[in-house]
Image (cartoon, rainbow, N blue to C red):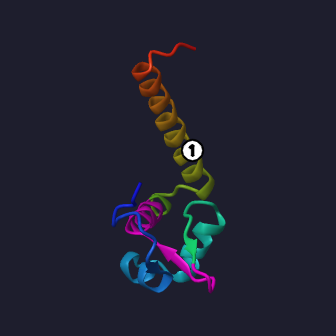
């Protein structure tokens, strides 16, 4: 499956910083806290997608609203679990599987 333009990791940390208004240090911190997952080039340069940039803005807004990084990560994990359950339900329905 080919990634859409929004998912291709082609944006440098400097450009991500300009687009989001976050410092490069803040972006690295969000990576350290497992909130964002850039790819690395062969030379080790971080590469972000447009979806990552949107995620960074969302993270920054939540932080401004007083959320802590662990709360943001926990919220994201709940969304992922819900998506996984929905997908499993759709697959089960499509293939008439039962638990």
* Residue 41 on image: x %, y %: 57, 80
* Residue 70 on image: x %, y %: 63, 53
Is residue 65 shown above or below 8?
above
What secondary structure is found at the residue carrying circle 1? Answer: helix
Callout count:
1
97 relative position to 4: left or right: right
- Which quadrant would the N terminus be assigned to in this image? bottom left
User: Residue at the spot x=50%, y=28% of the render?
Assistant: 88
User: Residue at the spot x=41%, y=26% of the render?
Assistant: 90
Is 6 magenta? The answer is no
Q: Where does the magenta region start and end?
A: 41-61
User: Residue at the spot x=39%, y=61% of the render?
Assistant: 3
* Residue 47 on image: x %, y %: 51, 76
- Which quadrant would the C terminus be assigned to in this image? top right
Give neighbour class at mark 1: few <14, some 14-19, many 20+ (Cα, 10 Å). few
Residue 11 sits in quarter: bottom left
Q: Which residue is mark 1?
A: 77
């Amino acid at each position: 499956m080919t990634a859409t333009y929004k998912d291709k990791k082609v944006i440098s940390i400097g450009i991500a910083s300009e687009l989001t208004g976050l410092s490069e240090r803040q972006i690295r911190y969000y990576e350290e806290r497992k909130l964002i997952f850039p790819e690395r080039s062969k030379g080790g340069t971080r590469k972000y997608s447009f979806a990552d940039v949107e995620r960074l803005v969302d993270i920054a807004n939540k932080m401004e609203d007083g959320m802590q990084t662990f709360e943001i990560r926990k919220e994201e994990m709940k969304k992922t679990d819900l998506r996984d359950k929905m997908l499993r339900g759709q697959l089960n329905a499509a293939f008439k599987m039962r638990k």
